[in-house]
Image: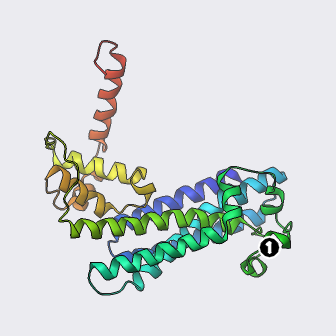
């Protein structure tokens, strides 16, 4: 069962990455992401209901550490969708007030769930048998009404709260990034600290595009929720380079008959050579 579940998560991440590559409009992106996430969660439910957990430990692990990662994606894209749909038309001052209000809503959730938040974040497990086993709910543990309407064969009293915590972390990051972009516009994108040396990309644009897609696929920016377009624009800004039709360039890279990751392969080989050379300066 674990292999099937892991493959579902891998497939879901690949689909979301593809959506991020193909769709720039945030509202349309959220709509498509929600669509594929719902299908993935439905398939996850089928796997769980068809197979029995071997032990309470395995069941707790699933509802505490696995299922929330699926549900968190659904919560995140649904919330971003709502935020973007309700985004007011107006100047930067109005937008900043709007986003700060959304941050206040997130803080209210953490304040209301402080006890469980501290339990989860601290890595405690002494109440896991009540929180993450099906049918083991305790009415004294501040249950949400949502739980009583959920399918108890596929839910525990607190797996949704874990997903909410994970999603809120990403939503907070999303909102903070929006505020940063607004501040950059207000400040004319002036940096408080500038490096003494200007770095110019002297490699090919194709190589930089390959690196761009590799870093985006790895999810190394903003916990994996940064848009490809934003990363590309950042690269263009810091390196003062025009990547042009980088999506078309990626299609050409993908169509290579051999060594499609030519630049990444070269990076790996040269780094390994440097590590093997004990006389090289670190």
Quadrant of the image occupied by residue 262: top left
Q: Nearer the viewer, residue 80 or 112?
A: 112
Q: Which residue is pictured at 13% across the width and 41% down the height?
A: 202
Q: Does 244 appear above or below 94?
A: above
Q: Is residue 98 left or right of residue 240?
A: right
Q: Which residue is pictured at 66% across the width and 72% down the height?
A: 112
Secondary structure of the residue carrying numbered label 1: loop
Neighbourhood count class around disc 1 (C-alpha, 10 Å): few under 14, some 14–19, many 20 upward: few
Q: Does 142 appear above or below 145?
A: above
Q: Nearer the viewer, residue 163 or 70?
A: 163
Q: Which residue is pictured at 17% across the width and 56% down the height?
A: 243
Number of numbered discs visible in the structure rendering: 1
Q: Position of residue 31 (x, y in %)?
A: 45, 78
Q: Which residue is pictured at 19% across the width and 59% down the height?
A: 190
Which quadrant holds the N terminus? bottom right
Which quadrant holds the C terminus? top left
Q: Which residue is mark 1?
A: 152
Q: Position of residue 229 (x, y in %)?
A: 29, 63
Quadrant of the image occupied by residue 97: bottom left
Q: Position of residue 176 (x, y in %)?
A: 40, 66
Q: Position of residue 13 (x, y in %)?
A: 50, 59
Q: Nearer the viewer, residue 31 or 79?
A: 79
The colour style of the image is: rainbow
Q: Which residue is farthest top?
A: 279
Can you see residue 256? Answer: no
Can you see residue 63? Answer: yes
């Amino acid at each position: 069962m674990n292999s099937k579940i892991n493959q579902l998560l891998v497939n879901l991440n690949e689909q979301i990455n593809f959506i991020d590559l193909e769709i720039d409009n945030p509202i349309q992106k959220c709509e498509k992401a929600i669509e594929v996430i719902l299908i993935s969660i439905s398939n996850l439910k089928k796997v769980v209901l068809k197979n029995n957990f071997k032990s309470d430990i395995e069941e707790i692990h699933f509802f505490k550490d696995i299922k929330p990662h699926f549900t968190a994606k659904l919560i995140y894209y649904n919330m971003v969708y709502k935020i973007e749909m309700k985004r007011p038309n107006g100047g930067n001052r109005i937008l900043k007030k709007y986003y700060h209000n959304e941050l206040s809503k997130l803080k209210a959730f953490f304040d209301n769930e402080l006890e469980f938040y501290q339990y989860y974040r601290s890595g405690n497990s002494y109440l896991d048998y009540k929180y993450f086993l099906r049918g083991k709910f305790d009415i004294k543990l501040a249950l949400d009404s949502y739980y009583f309407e959920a399918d108890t064969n596929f839910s525990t009293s607190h797996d949704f709260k874990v997903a909410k915590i994970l999603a809120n972390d990403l939503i907070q990051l999303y909102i903070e990034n929006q505020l940063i972009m607004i501040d950059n516009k207000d400040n004319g994108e002036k940096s408080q600290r500038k490096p003494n040396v200007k770095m110019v990309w002297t490699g090919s644009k194709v190589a930089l595009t390959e690196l761009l897609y590799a870093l985006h696929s790895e999810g190394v920016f903003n916990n994996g929720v940064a848009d490809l377009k934003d990363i590309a624009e950042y690269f263009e800004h810091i390196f003062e380079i025009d990547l042009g039709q980088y999506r078309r360039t990626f299609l050409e890279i993908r169509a290579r008959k051999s060594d499609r990751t030519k630049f990444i392969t070269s990076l790996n080989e040269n780094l390994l050579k440097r590590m093997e050379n004990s006389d090289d300066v670190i």
